[in-house]
């Protein structure tokens, strides 16, 4: 595994997403066995960075992640756990409550990273950060960040965050350059902020893209691994693919060690 070294921390270039673990917008208990076995497989093969949210399966994704980690007897310090506060909970008291609830569901006493999941029209970002800064001060969260923030909002968040804002988690992949075009990637790279790319392999046109396929064939890897390596070859970019399939999970994990050449990056530009 390669790591991004930032603010004296080492963050794995590839982590594991948990959207659809335990359900989607609501919990679906019929998916528990499938979800737990996906999490166990990921933990066993060496994923250490897990991305979850209070909104995933209405908190059930956090419960299942905490359960899988406990059952495997893993040391908490060996893991990097991210969770997120939902946009409807950005009032001061609500942020504090949401964090307590996430910690309880995970069965943990701190989060490595806590994000605002989405900005909300009319939100009071100052109020939200007053609570987030307090959580960081109390040691309940080790790092703060945001998600789906455009450049203007990201700059506001940086100004309000009393610690170094660790990341903006956004949709980023070979077919989706929204956060390159709006200047967020460049700002992150110039200001020591990680860009965490979500939905890195989801789009169907990754598999069918002839350039990705040609590079994958020459390298003897899959198009999805090239899509992940394209992200992790970029400075300050990490990513969090999700898969229920242990073979895909292993391929995704190995993609962190694949560094694309300047010419391959050029072909995919
Ligand atoms: N902050 C936000 O607003 C936000 C939004 C969306 C997502 N996220 C986070 O980002 C994580 C990842 O994003 P995502 O789940 O939307 O998309 P993704 O990880 O890009 O794609 C997941 C899909 O790709 C398939 N897949 C994964 N690896 C594969 C491989 N090596 N080969 C072939 N197929 C593969 C999976 O199917 P199989 O199970 O069959 O492998 C699954 O259907 C989420 O789980 C979540 O934690 C955050």
Image (cartoon, grey):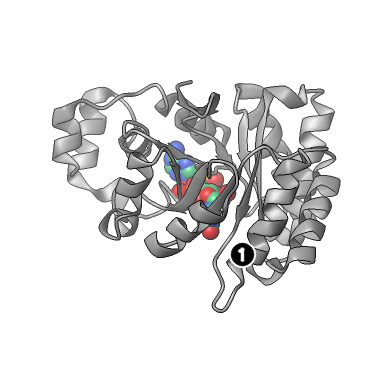
Q: Is residue 83 above or below residue 92?
A: above
Q: Nearer the viewer, residue 131 or 71?
A: 131
Q: Nearer the viewer, residue 33 or 252?
A: 252
- Whole-percent x and y of residue 75? 77, 22
Q: Which residue is mark 1?
A: 126
Q: Is residue 248 above or below residue 83?
A: above
What residue lies at 74% left-to-right and 65% top-to-bottom? Answer: 92
Q: Is residue 269 left or right of residue 255?
A: left
What residue lies at 72% left-to-right and 57% top-to-bottom? Answer: 131
Residue 28 visible: no
On whether ligand 1 comes within 8 Å of the CB at mark 1, the answer is: no
Quadrant location of residue 107? top right
Q: Is residue 7 left or right of residue 92?
A: left
Q: Is residue 207 above or below residue 264?
A: below
Q: Nearer the viewer, residue 204 or 145?
A: 145
> In terms of secondary structure, where does tag 1 sit?
helix
Quadrant assignment for the C terminus:
top left
What is the residue that sits farthest to the bottom in this orientation? 122
Give neighbour class at mark 1: few <14, some 14-19, many 20+ (Cα, 10 Å).
some
């Amino acid at each position: 595994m390669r790591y991004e070294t930032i603010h004296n921390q080492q963050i794995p270039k590839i982590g594991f997403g948990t959207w659809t673990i335990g359900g989607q917008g609501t919990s679906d208990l019929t998916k528990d066995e499938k979800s737990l076995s996906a999490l166990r497989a990921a933990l066993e093969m060496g994923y250490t960075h897990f991305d979850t949210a209070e909104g995933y399966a209405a908190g059930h994704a956090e419960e299942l992640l905490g359960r899988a980690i406990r059952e495997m007897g893993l040391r908490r310090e060996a893991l990097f756990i991210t969770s997120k506060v939902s946009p409807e909970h950005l009032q001061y008291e609500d942020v504090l409550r949401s964090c307590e609830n996430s910690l309880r569901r995970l069965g943990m006493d701190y989060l490595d990273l806590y994000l605002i999941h989405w900005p909300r029209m009319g939100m009071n970002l100052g109020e939200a950060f007053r609570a987030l800064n307090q959580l960081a001060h109390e040691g309940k969260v080790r790092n703060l960040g945001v998600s789906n923030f455009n450049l203007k909002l990201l700059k506001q968040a940086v100004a309000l965050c009393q610690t170094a804002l660790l990341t903006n988690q956004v949709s980023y992949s070979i077919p989706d350059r929204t956060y390159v075009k709006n200047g967020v990637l460049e700002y992150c790279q110039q200001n020591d902020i990680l860009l965490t790319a979500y939905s890195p392999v989801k789009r169907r046109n990754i598999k069918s893209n002839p350039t990705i396929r040609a590079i994958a064939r020459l390298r003897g890897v899959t198009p999805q691994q090239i899509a992940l390596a394209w992200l992790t070859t970029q400075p300050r970019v990490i990513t969090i693919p999700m898969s229920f399939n242990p073979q895909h999970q292993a391929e995704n994990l190995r993609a962190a060690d694949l560094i694309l050449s300047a010419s391959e990056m050029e072909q995919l530009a």
